[in-house]
Image (tube, rainbow, N blue to C red):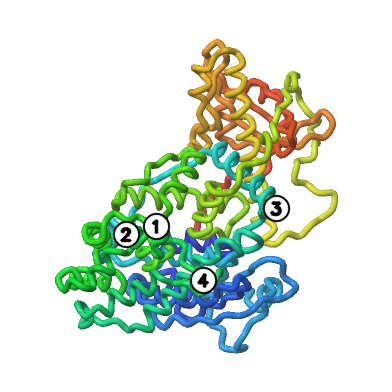
Amino acid sequence: MDITTYTEFNKALVAHGKTVLKELGLADLIRISNWSGSQALWLKTLARFDKQIQKTYGVKGLSFQVGGRDDGLNELETITNFHRLKSEPRVSHSLEAEKSKLESNIRAAYNSSGNLGDFLRQHAVPPKGSPHSASASLQPSITISTPAFVDAYSDMCARYLQENREEFKDFNIGAAFAGESYKTAVFLRALDILNAAKLRRKHIGSGKIASTVCSMIEINEGKGCRNNMVQWEGKQGPQSRSHRQMLEAMGDPERLEKLETLLYDLYCEEGDEVQIFGDLVSLLGARYDLLAYLFYLKDPNRFLPISPTNFEIAFHQLGIPLQLSGLCSWENYREYLARIRAVQHRLTAYGHPGCQLIDAHTFCWMLAKLTPLDGAYPTITPVYLKGDAQSAPAKATPPSDRTSVTLKTPEDFLNDQKRRNQLGGKSESTVYNAEVANLKAAGRGDLATKVKPVSDNIGLGYDIESFHPDGNPKRIEVKTASVSGDVWQFYLSENELEKATRIDGYVFALVRNPESQNPKIWEFDGPDIEKATLRPTTYHVSVIRAE
């Protein structure tokens, strides 16, 4: 089996499950090279999923080893080796050195700790029949359109630069890390409190469980470890404390027993999460910040804290509106989590491949809370170019060809793909916004409201459904083009080529310099693609093996 990337490993694991895990020997060793400062969280996360991995796949004896950072590396590199290594207590932190040692082994290379969480979430799920294996784990499917995400991301980056005097690069560095990393620190501290308490079922009704959970809420150990996720201090008086009814329950034996039963089942057993959430709402009131925080402490890979008003603002800007205020319920919480997961997926493809769920939470928070830009937001004014499509020289060099031979690592290919995704998203956003503006300028505001991004539906073969001013449909395939002289070059799939000549109203919109303030757009009709010079770059191969 030839697996060299995390994606290939992921697909193989999904396809073959238990058999693949046993063949690879997941129980032998997981080696982690990490400099992000979250080693403790990694180990605790792995340990929490150990039993689930055993139940689901029948593998035992998971062992962990955490290394440090090679000062020569500029980004996080994680080597996960699924083959037994009996020598050397610690391996090199260089991918090249690892490759020479582990050439015969199956590896998965990660560039962030977030992907470890992805692995655990996808492949260490509770076995069928466990209390929260069905309704609690399934989430609604939410899609954020490319134009909406690109515009929101660009807006957030511009406001981040204005407020912090630095460019936003990642969630693990700079002002973003300094301002939001407290959430992970608070989680780790709460986990220490819970582990130290050594709760048992016999403690139900004694007050120990409730007191422990109150301590997990009232964390205040300095700026970097202070719980701002729950309104627990009562700044507007005792009645404003989110966990007020939890404190009051300690003086009511009947309520205390009910409360501690729920909390014990939440943290120490695999209780029905849907039922627990609803019962806690009934017992403690519809305090969304408190309920979400309690579940976040249970599993930060599945649950998140909440600030209803702020996330309503962020979701509206992302084009996935959801009312949260006054709607503290399990179904509403699932809708909220599904939207954060959709943001995580967009961020992962848009230059943050190791994005964790809590990072997507941070992105939404910054989107809602960063100070609005001073003055007008820089206006992007596309320049439309005229011209007919004509055949280019047959030997035109493809955009990715180099004049010299360059050996690329798997990480280089991943970075190239990230860059293409970013440019493609920016190009699509530019064309989408230009279509809306052009229709409004033509007095067709009725049609402008119907312009729709459809790039997530790959089978359609185009990216945007729009209209000509006369009302006729306009199906736009957006391409980021490289330009050399008069020659515009881009890549085209077989599906897009077939659709271009068959669908009425099909138009190619080629975008040059999509990240500039004046990107160039050249449009031509789909059937004119037959005039272009097409050069095959990949082949689909079918071959019969006969013995």
Quadrant in the rendering for residue 260: bottom left
Instruction: Find the residue positioned furthest to the left.
Output: 254
Amino acid on which disc 1 is placed:
Gln
Amino acid on which disc 4 is placed:
Cys
Amino acid on which disc 2 is placed:
Gln
Q: CA distance from mark 2 to mark 4?
A: 25 Å
Position above or below: 150 against 299: above
- The residue at 45%/79% (across/down) is 27
Across and down, in percent, residue 168 comes to: 66, 53
Residue highlighted by disc 1: 236
**C-beta proximity under 8 Å, tags 1 and 4:** no
**Left or right for 22, reference 202:** right
Looking at the rendered structure, the secondary structure element under dot 1 is loop
N-term mark: 3 or 4:
3
Residue highlighted by disc 3: 167
N-term mark: 3 or 1:
3
**C-beta proximity under 8 Å, tags 2 and 3:** no
- The residue at 64%/74% (across/down) is 103
Residue highlighted by disc 2: 239
**C-beta proximity under 8 Å, tags 2 and 4:** no
N-term mark: 2 or 4:
4
Q: CA distance from mark 3 to mark 4?
A: 25 Å
